[in-house]
Image (cartoon, rainbow, N blue to C red):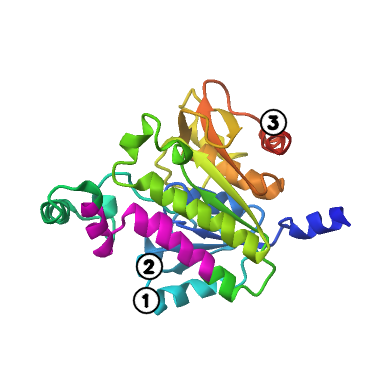
Amino acid sequence: MEILVAASAALQPGDTVAVVGASGNVGKLVALRLSDTYRVNGIVRDASSVSSFFEGRDNINLYESDLLLQNDESSSSSLRPALQDANAVVICTGTTAFPTKAWSRNEDKEVTQDVWGALLESKFNIREAVSKLDQLGLNTPYNVDTLGNEMILRAWNSCAKNKKKRAILLSSIGVQRRDKMPFPILNTCGVLDAKAAGEADLIKTAAENGYSYTIVRPGQLFGGPYDNNYYLGTLFQLDKDVATQDVQVGLGDELLGDTLRSTLAEVTAQLCEADCGRDMDFAVVNVKGSSPSVEELQTRLQGLSIA
């Protein structure tokens, strides 16, 4: 009986996976790689920004939604076509730890004036200033990693027509070490707090709605940019010029290091295809050495369940 239940919960070839943030440097690789095995519904803010990247991938469909409009019914409604048939959701959204153009609504404008205005109004209390930027509806960590992620899961839970099997959240190392250096610096504007809240909501929501969760914590992302969708074998081959391609994984939040975007995308795909890493959180970083084979990577991921 347990084997039958496990099999029914595993993603099957041809199942539908919704990839949230499919226009980002990680998200588009995740969507591309998952399309080898599954139908992919990519959720993006502007489909025209990434449609050429997915040219020829007929099993990838793009849906536009603005996740910054959390209190706008139209935003939640725009998610439904992408989520209603999804058996799984992979959340690849994120923003920078400190104010940059990435904090602007379309990630293309300077926010310096908004930041200075918020700082002056809050008498240079950083957290109060960031809260004011949240209220402006900017692409802040709280709006993206907390409110946005909550809205995605809420929409999926309410509209799903197919069996919901699993949700994967790409988070960050340091979430559980926010009081240990160097992470308090990274968390100055609350990015790790926002990710922690998003993680907690995923764990709670998955338990309440009967599907499994996986939280993947990469280090600082590097590699790319990736401008085409042609690759052979695994995504590691997109970074042939990088000497640090071996992969280290560890339960919880104990690793230090950086993570190739291509590695993170391949790990995400292997979680789905090998049906591993359920109901757990783990970190992944790259270390010196050659990239592992698919079999080696699967063995490492499966080993997390018995660590």
Q: Considering the numbered disc 1 on the image, is that residue within a helix, a strand or a loop?
A: loop
How far is the residue under mark 3 from the one under mark 1?
Answer: 45 Å
Asked if marks 1 and 2 touch (Cβ < 8 Å), the reply is: yes
Q: Pinpoint residue 112: horizontal percent, then vertical percent.
A: 15, 51
- Which image quadrant: the N terminus? bottom right
Question: Which of label 3 and label 1 is nearer to you?
Answer: 1
Q: Let me know if residue 301 is in the magenta part.
A: no
Q: Let me know if residue 141 is in the magenta part.
A: yes
Q: Nearer the viewer, residue 34 or 195?
A: 195
Question: Which image quadrant is residue 56 in?
Answer: bottom right
Q: Which residue is mark 1?
A: 72
Q: Considering the numbered disc 3 on the image, is that residue within a helix, a strand or a loop?
A: helix
Q: Pinpoint residue 94: horizontal percent, then vertical percent.
A: 40, 51
Q: Pinpoint residue 59: horizontal percent, then vertical percent.
A: 60, 62
Query: Which mark is on residue 296?
Result: 3
Q: Which residue is mark 2?
A: 66
**Residue 233 left/right relative to 9:** left
Residue 307 seen in render: yes
As shown in the figure, which amino acid type bears the numbered disc 1? Answer: Asp
How far is the residue under mark 3 from the one under mark 2?
Answer: 38 Å
As shown in the figure, which amino acid type bears the numbered disc 2? Answer: Asp
Query: Which mark is on residue 171?
Result: none
For the magenta stretch, what is the residue range?
128-154
**Residue 61 left/right relative to 48:** right
Sooner in the amino-acid sequence: mark 3 or mark 1: 1
Q: Is residue 27 above or below residue 245?
A: below
